[in-house]
Image: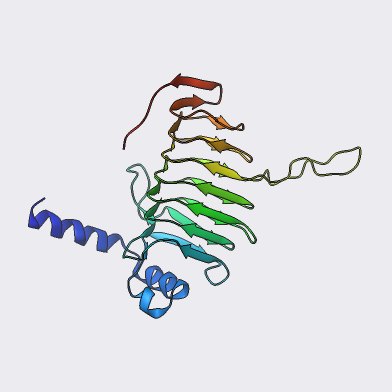
Amino acid sequence: MSVLQSIKSILTKLRELNFFSTIYINFITFSFDKAILFPILIFGRVNIKNARKGKLVFDCPLKTGLLQIGKHGLGFLDKRNCCTIWNIAGILYISGKARIGQGCCVEVGENATMTFGRDFNVTGRSVILCSNHITFVDGCLLSWDLLIMDKDWHSVISTVDGSILNLSKPINVGNHVWIGCRSTILKGVNISDNVIVAANSTISRSIDKEFVAVSGNGVLREDVRWEY
């Protein structure tokens, strides 16, 4: 890359950066000496909720842009008007570089815990709702229009004894997992390492095998891997 191209790239990133929100979230989250590193960068329109209530825990050395929220990466999204929602009322652990694309909604409820492993990347316009516990290990790539939730949000109640039948259950996504666009991951699911989830899949049961491509109908192919 030439010097001119490098300068152009830097200017483009600065133009997209939401300076006010970036300053706000860093100085709310960190002490002054850490905040001036600007580990969190906010891009575009981002609705930040519960910044003083929730907790971000970085299990890695801090550096500029470690967590990027609202970064434009999908050409079909309206760069100016598409809003990202960042609502952390519980605890979010971050183990390394993480990127939350434009138009996503990331929510961690009170008393809930979510973990982003190293090199976590969600492309854009996806929804992650954590009311209990969701873990993404290292190298996970999430496409657009995903829904990931560890709770049904409406109770199913037994008419025999009045007990709730659909309690929330943790979700665990292993290392180097690629989840294709418009897929849904439901409560109680464990996904092994090196799994590809095909587009438009609904995953309601755990995937125990590694190096497989799966859909909502089961294993599509074994002995496969993916690169990014």
Q: Specify the color scheme.
A: rainbow
Q: Determine whether 225 is above or below 132 in the image.
A: above
Q: Residue 3 appears in which quarter of the rendering?
A: bottom left
Residue at x 74% of width, y 41% of height: 166
* Horizontal arrangement in the rendering, residue 93 relative to residue 96 (left or right): right
Residue at x 41% of width, y 71% of height: 26
Residue at x 64% of width, y 61% of height: 110
- Residue 101 visible in rendering: no
Residue 40 point in image, percent of width and height = 38, 64
Viewport quadrant of the C terminus: top left
Q: Determine whether 26 is above or below 117 in the image.
A: below
Residue 127 point in image, percent of width and height = 52, 47
Toward the right, the furthest residue is 160
Residue 21 point in image, percent of width and height = 41, 69
Callout count = 0
Judging depth in this view, the residue of 143 and 210 nearest the camera is 210
* Horizontal arrangement in the rendering, residue 33 relative to residue 181 (left or right): left
Toward the top, the furthest residue is 221
- Residue 160 visible in rendering: yes
Q: Determine whether 54 is above or below 78 in the image.
A: below
Residue 137 point in image, percent of width and height = 46, 46
Toward the bottom, the furthest residue is 32
Q: Residue 218 appears in which quarter of the rendering?
A: top right
Judging depth in this view, the residue of 176 and 145 nearest the camera is 176
Q: Determine whether 87 is above or below 216 in the image.
A: below
